[in-house]
Amino acid sequence: FGAFKKNLEESIGCFNSDGSFLTPEFIAKFFKEDREEETLTFDFHGQWKLFKRFPIHDPARQLIVTKFIDALVTHPRGDEITGINMANTGCGDDFLIALADRCLADESLLPNLYMVNFETNFINVEGIVALAKLIASPTCFQCLQVVRLENQNLMLKSKAEFALARAMRVNYSVVVMSLRVRNLMERTQIGKYVVRNVDFIRQARQRHFKATGQQRERNQVEKFFDKVTEDDPEIEEVNLVGNKRFLTLTQEEKIKAARSFGSNSHVKMINLNSCGIDDDFVVALGNSLEVNNTVQKVFLEGNHISGEGIIALFESLAKNTSVGELRLHKQSKIMNTSDEQVLADILEPNTTMTKVGIDLRTTMAQVKLDKKLGLNKNLSLKMKALSKGEDFSPNDSISNMKFIS
């Protein structure tokens, strides 16, 4: 521990309290450029040492935050920046307030900003209200489509949710608002405005086609799923966590993506965490998994799947013989306790599922599911032992273990 503490102190010692380290060269170190997609992301995620060095009570904190924002938005490549990723950095309300004040004062800054990610930080009312002003502005961040705010250290207050809902009412560009909203009215309103904005994009594409007679070129993600449908042997994993292209696909294209696995025999892992997945997608994916015997792992965490969608997926997995691991944590929609109770019963015909990650509120539902997974685990161990010609002694305690990590 002493060595770790010493290394930490040395690594944050370069952060001078006068902010002289916040230069264009410092900002450029965290640029990630994708020339094919024509994107430039300021990717500072996981860089928690800066705000560890300058906690909220530090006298130099305000100066550091102000200089940080100024260095970022006025960078020589500022007009090219399409994304800002500040997830898990320890930033707070003051960072968003400074960003909003700076950009509202000069609306020409960050004209191509497409995505902001402030997940897993210390942001609450003041920061969200400041961000809401940017979202509501008709002249700032006109290209902004993706806003990610999940997993803040403190539970979001109603005032912040209300500010976001009001901002989304007059915003026509944001198509992904990743945030767990507790109040039903605000959650419904934000969801409605997101759907409206997605529909506006679809209509704009149709108008473009009618005006020019040219169908738009399919984007990289759409082409990728075309290959999945064609059973490309080189694709063994579908890993698109939070992919911005997938997030802005039309509902029709998303359903086509879900159906692509029905004709595929090479993909073994599907990871679509934080991709705006809803019940319709899960139903289509479930139908594909009923006839797919290759996929072994399915990760759908941090999406918008309700109890209805989860039940439909479990009904399909009851007929599947290859999937061994399923993860569904952190859905924005809460499952009814009555739906939780039937999950283990639905999964009864399945013999391959041994790991399920899901947020269940009722102890009885969790116990029943763990017991079913334990039986499947026992069966899996037995089959492995028999294939090696070894004797197998069933472990009765497995039925009482939890196979969720």
Image (tube, grey):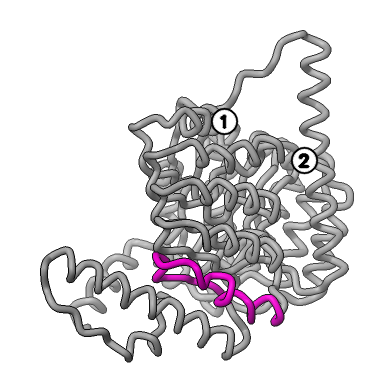
Where residue 336 appears, as percent x and y from the top left, is: 72, 77
Q: Quadrant of the C terminus?
A: bottom left
Where residue 384 appears, as percent x and y from the top left, is: 21, 67
Disc 1 designates what residue?
Answer: 222
Q: On screen, 347 above or below 104?
A: below
The quadrant where residue 207 appears: top right
Left or right relative to 135: residue 286? left
* Identity of the residue drawn at 82% across and 13% down: 210
* Identity of the residue drawn at 40% across and 39% down: 265
- Is the residue marked by circle 1 packed among few (<14), some (14-19), or many (20+) residues within 10 Å? some
Q: Nearer the viewer, residue 383 or 153?
A: 383
Q: Disc 2 on helix, strand or loop?
A: helix
Disc 2 designates what residue?
Answer: 198
**Residue type at tag 2:** Val
Q: Residue furthest left?
A: 389
Magenta residues (range) = 337-359
Q: Is residue 349 magenta?
A: yes
Q: Is residue 110 visible?
A: no
Left or right relative to 196: residue 11? left
Where residue 262 appears, as percent x and y from the top left, is: 52, 41
